[in-house]
Amino acid sequence: MPQNGTMIRVDHVTKSYRRDRIEIPVLRDISIDVPTGEFLALMGPSGSGKTTLLNLIAGIDRPDTGKVVVNGTDIDLLGESELARWRARHVGFIFQFYNLLPVLTAFENVELPLLLTGLSRKEKREHVEAALNLVGLGDRIHHYPKQLSGGQEQRVAIARAIVTDPTILVADEPTGDLDKVSAGEIMDLLDRLNKEFKKTIVMVTHDPRAAEKAHKAMHLDKGELTT
Amino acid sequence: MFIIKLVLKNSIRHKLRTFLTIVGVAIAVMSFGFMRTIVTAWSSGVQSSSENRMITRQAVSFIFPLPYSCLQQIQQIPGVTEVSYANWFGGVYKDAADWKNFFPRIAIDPETYFSVYPEFIVPADQFAEFKKERNACLVGEKLAREHGFKLGDLIPVEGDIYPGRWEFVVRGIYRGKDQSTDETQMFFHWEYLNERMHVETPGREGLVGWYILTVHNAADMPRVAKAVDDRYKNSRSSTKTETEREFQQSFVSMSSAIINSLEVVSYVIIGIILLVLANTIVMAARERTKEYAVLKTLGFSARHIIGLIAGESMFIASTGCVIGLGLTFPMAVGFAKAFPTFFPVFNVETVTIILAVIVALFAGVAAALFPATRAVRMKIVDGLRSID
Ligand SMILES: Nc1ncnc2c1ncn2[C@@H]1O[C@H](COP(=O)(O)OP(=O)(O)OP(=O)(O)O)[C@@H](O)[C@H]1O
Ligand SMILES: [Mg+2]
């Protein structure tokens, strides 16, 4: 991929959900280009379709019409298991509520995505420790999620998202459940991942302070882009 | 490896729920094993019957005797190799309310009985002693163990069918040829019974409870049965001759209603195991919907999700099965102790164990079927939106 080429291209995408036989249009003819190395914030009122758009980019949902191309791959053309493999290889996910597995330690949670790779035990261990050190939790590797603060849990989740060195990072309101201080730390971390590690990031947020860290903000309203 | 670790960690997430489910499965497996053991014990009498033995009894009922004079006549019938005879003695030994004291006491002809029943093995010296003494008796090894009978012991019995006080001296202890041989009986001289009848209740001498015939060739049996029964057709004591297997089945079938219902209940138990297990697995899988969605998001496949759910189901089912089978043995031993003469042979058969394992494995798979299908079909976006 050429530097500063297009990393993510959303091309005339529409999406609607059915509820009780009624079609609810969620995204109407959305087109976006996200250059490589971009840090994009998606903003907009609740129900405007931000999460839906993010899910389409991340390949965990499919558009009704239009296409999504990431890093040169037209992901609509992939079958279910190909898509799963593609996600494992190319996408790092960060959720609002962290979504760590409560029965696994920080180490084991971060190790999860690596289990699908052919890495040796030793390599996995090194990767996991590097990722946890990067998010500043090198001393908490044997803690369970419930023994961590919300901010720490989110940092474990970020470590899990980056441990496979994915092509893009998607984050859905990563600071939505955190206090100001923790939110600031998470934003600094994402900023660092973007600047130092050149990760392309798409982040949904309600928080204008969070959006400030991004290079660019786009606004969705009732399924349409307003800026 | 990871799947196994996660299965175990998931299983102990709700310790109490998992524990109760395992206990439920264990109790059900134990009941299943125990009931199957009763069913097999009940029919083992039929299974252990010999291929070449036949029984001739009074046509109307087993409780009416036949004249001793039939012996020679039956011996004459072509195809018959040997004939022996016996009487059911009954009587009361010690406290009749205790099942333990209810063992079979049978008057037999020592000259022929053990050659038609070669599965009863008596040491030669003991057998010689037994033959010498009028009121000697032989007891089965299991019976002797149960009551602590030793050679030379006196067994007093209060007669009912044959009134009076009877005393028998233990002169031998027989052993069964294999596991299925009944070692709970007591045998004594028919001659002794007959003598006392002759003196004490004239008119009741010279009577035989039933005859045991051996035939040279099992294919001859229908012909021999017909020949014997035709011989006595119009006499006062008409006979009914059948193979030993048929004869024993006629006893077993008296209780076949009970056996059938036990059999039905044992199948109902399979359903109970399934319900107990399915309830837990469905609940657990529902709670973890969001986690399965996260795993799928990270690229884990249907295979992994199925492994997680089925693994937990199998883990609980097999743990319960092992504990349940572990309990079946002491339960069977306890039952055999409490009712030693209820069933001549009471063992947990290998086939019962295999059956219980199959049942548990089947329940493990079946319980996971619905929740696993549901989890695999679930769309990631819906799973992520579910609240936990
Ligand atoms: N899986 C789904 N099934 C049915 N309806 C859905 C589904 N996902 C989203 N919707 C509907 O689509 C619309 C947009 O949802 P979406 O989650 O994308 O909004 P959002 O902008 O992320 O909102 P919020 O800021 O509250 O997270 C909403 O009306 C929602 O109810
Ligand atoms: Mg949202």
Image (cartoon, rainbow, N blue to C red):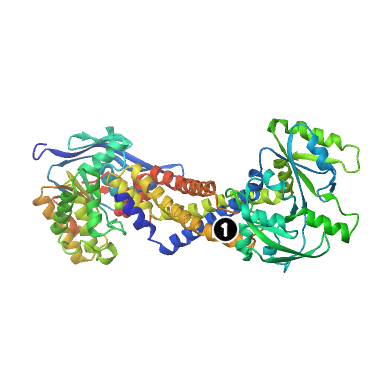
What residue sits 46% from the left and 42% below the top?
A21
Residue B71, horizontal then vertical, whole percent: 81, 42
Question: The C terminus of chain B appears in which quarter of the rendering?
Answer: bottom left
Residue A86, horizontal then vertical, whole percent: 24, 39
Q: Does the residue labelled 1 lie within 8 Å of ligand 1?
A: no
Q: Tell which of B263 and B365 is nearer to you.
A: B263
Q: Could you tell me how many numbered marks the image carries?
A: 1
Q: Tell which of B121 and A172 is nearer to you.
A: B121
Secondary element at image label 1: helix
How busy is the neighbourhood of tag 1: few (under 14 within 10 Å), some, or many (20 plus)? many
**In the drawing, does residue B80 fall left or right of residue A5?**
right
**In the drawing, does residue B305 fall left or right of residue B227?**
left
**In the drawing, does residue B231 fall left or right of residue B255?**
right
Q: Is residue A173 visible?
A: no
Residue B190, horizontal then vertical, whole percent: 77, 53
Where does label 1 land, which residue? B332
Amino acid type at mark 1: Ala
**Res B127 quadrant in image:** bottom right
Residue B72 in the image: above or below residue B315: above
Q: Tell which of A208 and B9 is nearer to you.
A: B9
**In the drawing, does residue A169 fall left or right of residue B132?**
left
Q: Can residue B200 be seen in this view?
A: yes
Residue A18, horizontal then vertical, whole percent: 41, 42
**Res B249 quadrant in image:** top right
Q: Tell which of B137 and A130 is nearer to you.
A: B137
Residue projecting furthest to the bottom: B95
> Chain for mark 1?
B
Residue B75 in the image: above or below residue B6: above
What residue sits 77% from the left and 57% below the top?
B89
